[in-house]
Every structure is written in C-alpha cells, then in structure tokens.
Image (spheres, grey):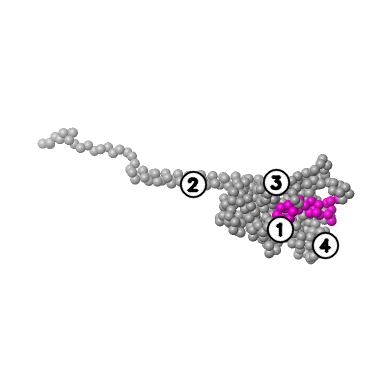
Amino acid sequence: MARHVPEALIPKQRDRASGFTLAELLVSVFVLGIVILLVTQLMTNATAITRIGHKHIDTDTQARAVFDRMALDFAQMVKRTDVDYYIKQPDIAYRGHGNGHGWGRGRNGDTGSDQIAFFSEVPGYYASSWGSPISLVAYRVNEDNTSTNPAYVRLERMAKGLFWNGAYNTGNNIPLFFLPLTIDTMWPPATHNFGGGNPNLSRDTDNYETIGPGVFRFEYYYLLKNGRVTDWPWDRWDSQFANQQTITNPVQIGLTQVEAIAVALAVIDPAGRALIDAVSRDRILDLAGDMADFKSARGRGVGAQKIGELEAQWKGVVESVAQTGLTPSGQPVPPEAAKTIRIYNRYFNLKTL
C-alpha cells in the first residue's frame, strides 16, 4: 500500500528568475566602454578636422584676395621698354630681391622676401584732388620692427597716384615714368624696406596699406616665353643677350621675354601667428628666413629648375617645424602654429608685349 506523503513535505523546484550573470554584465560594460571610446575619438578627430578646415579657409581667403588684387595690377601694367621696373634682376642689380638675399639658412639680416614696383593703369591714392589713370604699384613685406607697427612682417601694397607729366615734381613737366629716371630714385618708399639703411626712405604711410595680414613670405620669379623658369627676366642662355646686365643695359629689353610672373606666398592663420608672437615677435622672421629664395641656378637659394620646386621646399620647412617644433636653423616655433601655415602660388600672364 502506497504511503501518502504530505504535500507540504515535498520540496518545490524554484522558478529560475530571468536576468544577466555577473560575467555577462562585465562583458557588456567592457563593450560599452569601447563604443564610447570610439565615438569620443571620432568626435575629437572631427572637431580637429573642422578646426583645421576653418583655419585653412582663413588662409585661403587671404591668399585669394591678394592674388586677385595682383591680377588687376599686373593686367594693367604699363608694359614698355622705355620705363623703369623695380624687379628681380641679376646679382649685379638684384634690386627687387628684398634688398638682400634669403638663402633659406636663417634671417641673414633680412626676411628674404622680395619687393616689386611698377607702373600700372589702376586707381591710386592722390595727395590732392588732381589725378590720372596711372599709379606706381609696389608690394613688400614690411620689416619695420617698431613695437607699435601693426604691419610688421605683413604684406603691404602701395598704389601712389601720379600725374602723367610729373608737374608736381619740379614744375618742368618731366615725364617721370620714362628712363633714365628710375623708380628707386624718384620714389624711395617703393623700393626700400626697414631691414637696413635709412628707415625714413621706407616710410610712406599715405600710400601703403596692409593687404595680406597673414602673408609673411613673398617671392616671385619668371616664366619666359621659351618655357624656362628663372629669376632673370630674360633668357641669359640666349647669345643675343649674353652681355645683358639689367633690363635696361646694354639693351632696353624690359619684360619682352617674360610670359608670366609667378608669385609664391606663405600665409599663416591669425591664431597661429598669435602663438608664434607669444614666443617672440621676431620668430616669424626666423621661419620666413628658412624659406629659401627662388634661384634658377644652383647656388644661393633653392636652385629650382622646374615649376613647383620652390613651393615644395617651403612646404618641407613647414612640415618639419610641425613635427619637430624647430625651424631648420634651430629656432623654436610652436608646432600647432606651423600647422596653420599654407603655401600658395599663382602665375600672372603678362600677354605679348
């Protein structure tokens, strides 16, 4: 006979509650941490890219404004063989080469940036209500290191309105544009800078304006009609001009052999400039001094033989500073400041003279 066991004495099987084990929770937390880390990294990279993009927009805008202004000035240049130009010529008369020669080995007494001055049929500043459709146009990087100078190591443009007959000069109606009178004799501020000599010859506050506040390096060279790129405005390999020393001697050659003028600019974002100025106000000159000149033969400067070699050298300097925090000549520059620098170039066709 079966024995009856009271129901209360029969052990009941527990209902297993649904849920996660401790191991599962730990794995979930670990995976969630990785996801959060990845998302944070993506957001950080996106922010950095956006910030750099905004800085590049600033430098792009500046470079575009400068090039557009130059395009107008060059397009209306007075192109004649009997007028003077203040431009790069051979070492004997290398007047437009920043009143010095930047080797890309530090400052060497000057920034290395070029200067240029020429006559152009663009509006300019006039000291009176008189005027004419002709101006003396000049570009330079200001080297006046006076602490109160807001244009220090910034690109300036002059547009000095002139009279065709030059009557304002001596009253004898000498046409000042034509040789043998030269730009550096008649208008010293267009051809001098503050790096040496008499600084008063460089001052012309009425006619210079800062056109490129972020432009700290300015260089130009020539594309000849035979396809050569050179720092001489004529083909020195042409036997016809073997003895040519300047654009006026012995032949008044002017710019007749030049197809285009190539301009290279180094532009820094305002925030990057502020970082460099916090180290030293002159440190931007050290950086500019390590960006070598264009040179069409091996020697002082880049020794560039092809289009783009100068700009590639400048980019190499910037990338080196961004990685090491030092200029090639050993001067400290904040790497983050170097990352805001961009290099630009443009060719301005002078058409057929």
Q: Main secondary structure of the magenta part?
A: loop
Mark 2 crowd level (few <14, some 14–19, many ≥20, 10 Å Cα)? few
Q: Which residue is mark 1?
A: 100
Residue drawn at x 68%, y 62% is 300
Q: CA distance from mark 2 to mark 4?
A: 67 Å
* 21 left or right, relative to 243: left
* Vertical relation: 243 (above or below) 31: below
Mark 3 crowd level (few <14, some 14–19, many ≥20, 10 Å Cα)? some
Mark 2 or mark 4: name the one nearer the start of the chain.
Answer: 2
Q: Which residue is mark 4?
A: 250
Query: Magenta residues, as a range?
Result: 175-199
Q: CA distance from mark 3 to mark 2?
A: 41 Å
What kind of residue is marked 2? Gln
Between circles 3 and 2, the one closer to the viewer is 3
Q: Nearer the viewer, residue 184 or 202?
A: 202
Residue drawn at x 78%, y 46% is 160
Mark 4 or mark 3: name the one nearer the start of the chain.
Answer: 3
- Residue 103 lies in magenta, yes or no? no
Between circles 2 and 4, the one closer to the viewer is 4
- The disc at residue 210 is 3
Q: Position of residue 341 (x, y in %)?
A: 62, 51
State which quarter of the image contains the N terminus.
Answer: top left
What kind of residue is marked 3? Thr
* 206 left or right, relative to 58: right
Mark 1 or mark 3: name the one nearer the start of the chain.
Answer: 1
